[in-house]
Amino acid sequence: MARSKSSNKWLKEHFADQYVKKAQAAGYRSRAVYKLLEVQKKDRVIKPGMVVVDLGAAPGGWSQLAVEWVKPRGQVIALDILPMEAIPDVEIITGDFTTDEVYQQLLTHLNGRQVDVVLSDMAPNMSGMTAVDQPRSMYLVELAFDFAMQTLKPGGSFLVKVFHGEGSEAFLKQLRQAFTKVVVRKPDASRDRSSEVYMLAQGKRAP
């Protein structure tokens, strides 16, 4: 089947992308690593010995970075609906985070341990229709927030991808109520035309 002009354009753009080239040369699984690297450089979110949960982790670039930063005694648990190749010292759960079964599986994996950092790069399969995509995206954001509130230790951090649009400002207010410091980052590696930003909430307030 012939590729459409738009998909050809995307592929051409993708492979000409400086971050794609850098990621391939460095052995990273995705260009998204440079988004997390920039946040980490500015905000020092992940430190040695921490327990980190990476939601929407496939193909595993963020987990690749996180596991290096938490060594030697930290732990990274990665979850995605898509299967991922193994990453040394990362526990991988394959399943749909929106289902109770997989949510419970993740909690069972933690075995009562509190989490230091929850990362969420989750996004729905985009249809191109904002009226459909934005509610789906905010649903995933809210699920990740609920998980963070349930599992983060007091003082813990939550980094989540949010698409600007209906619900995003209300969610920012919600974060500010639950954490002592909240910043919005638009990393250089985030494509200009994308409405995505990363909201970083640090210092989870005690209940």
Image: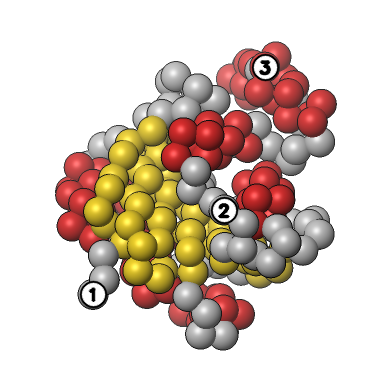
- The answer for how far apart the CA atoms under marks 2 and 1 are is 24 Å
The image shows residue 78, relative to residue 31, as above or below, that is below
- The answer to whether residue 142 is left or right of residue 57 is left
Residue depth check, mark 2 versus mark 1: number of the one nearer the observer: 2
Residue at 42%, 44% (x, y): give it: 161
Q: Is residue 192 visible?
A: yes
For disc 2, the marked residue is 47
Q: Position of residue 184 (x, y in %)?
A: 33, 36
Numbered badge on residue 18: 3
Q: Residue 207 carries which label?
A: 1
Q: For mark 2, give the secondary structure.
A: loop
The 10 Å Cα crowd at callout 1, few under 14, some 14 to 19, many 20 or more, is: few
Where in the figure is residue 82, as x and y percent of width and height?
66, 57
Spatial CA distance of label 3 from label 1 is 44 Å
- Secondary structure of the residue carrying tag 3 is helix
139 above or below 148? above
Task: Please say which color scheme the image uses.
Answer: secondary structure
What residue is at 23 percent from the left and 75 percent from the top? 207
Front residue of 45/15: it is 45
Amino acid tagged 3 = Gln
Distance of mark 3 from mark 2, alpha carbons? 28 Å
Q: Which of marks 3 and 2 is nearer the N terminus?
A: 3
Residue lying at 31% horizontally and 39% vertically, measured from the top left: 183
Disc 3 packing (10 Å; few <14; some 14–19; many ≥20): few
Residue displayed at 35% across by 52% down: 202
Q: Which amino acid does label 2 sit on?
A: Lys
